[in-house]
Amino acid sequence: MRKSDENLALLYKAVMTLKDEKECAAFFEDLCTPQELSAIAQRLHVASMLTEGKVYNSIVEATGASTATISRVNKTLTYQTSGGYKIVFERMKGGK
């Protein structure tokens, strides 16, 4: 296993130990710089709005994201097969 794979596995295991929003916030505030955390949160918000069928202009206005960021997130939603966003959004809505 490559070191980068080991690092990712450690990160995923750490995230899975978190029990609530307060723990999650504490962990991510320790792990990420404010800018990194803001960028991650912004991409999630963009993905949510794209999933809802919102257009780029309204996403730019609501999130402050650049059209390049929106395009990258849209490509991930459209072409990535992992389905991570879908899993999260379904669970946040009370699905599986």
Image (tube, rainbow, N blue to C red):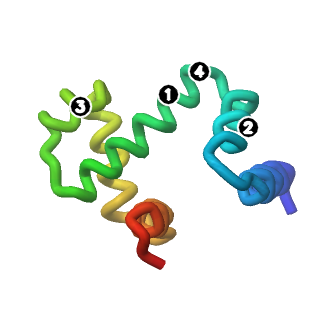
The Cα atoms of the two marked residues, 2 and 1, are separated by 14 Å
Say which mark, if any, is on residue 88: none
Q: Earlier in the sequence, mark 3 or mark 4?
A: 4
Name which residue type carries label 4.
Answer: Pro
Disc 3 marks which residue? 62
Name which residue type carries label 3.
Answer: Ala
Q: Nearer the viewer, mark 2 or mark 1?
A: 2
Tell which of 12 and 76 is nearer to you.
12
Tell which of 87 and 1 is nearer to you.
87
Residue drawn at x 41%, y 40% as measured from the top left: 43
The Cα atoms of the two marked residues, 2 and 4, are separated by 12 Å
Neighbor class of circle 1 (other Cα within 10 Å; few <14, some 14-19, many 20+) is few
Disc 4 marks which residue? 34
The quarter of the image holding the N terminus is bottom right
Mark 1: which secondary structure?
helix
The answer to whether the residue labelled 4 contacts the one labelled 1, judged by CB atoms less than 8 Å apart, is yes
Name which residue type carries label 1.
Answer: Ser
Rendered location of residue 5, percent (x, y): 78, 56
Neighbor class of circle 3 (other Cα within 10 Å; few <14, some 14-19, many 20+) is few
Say which mark, if any, is on residue 38: 1
Mark 4: which secondary structure?
helix
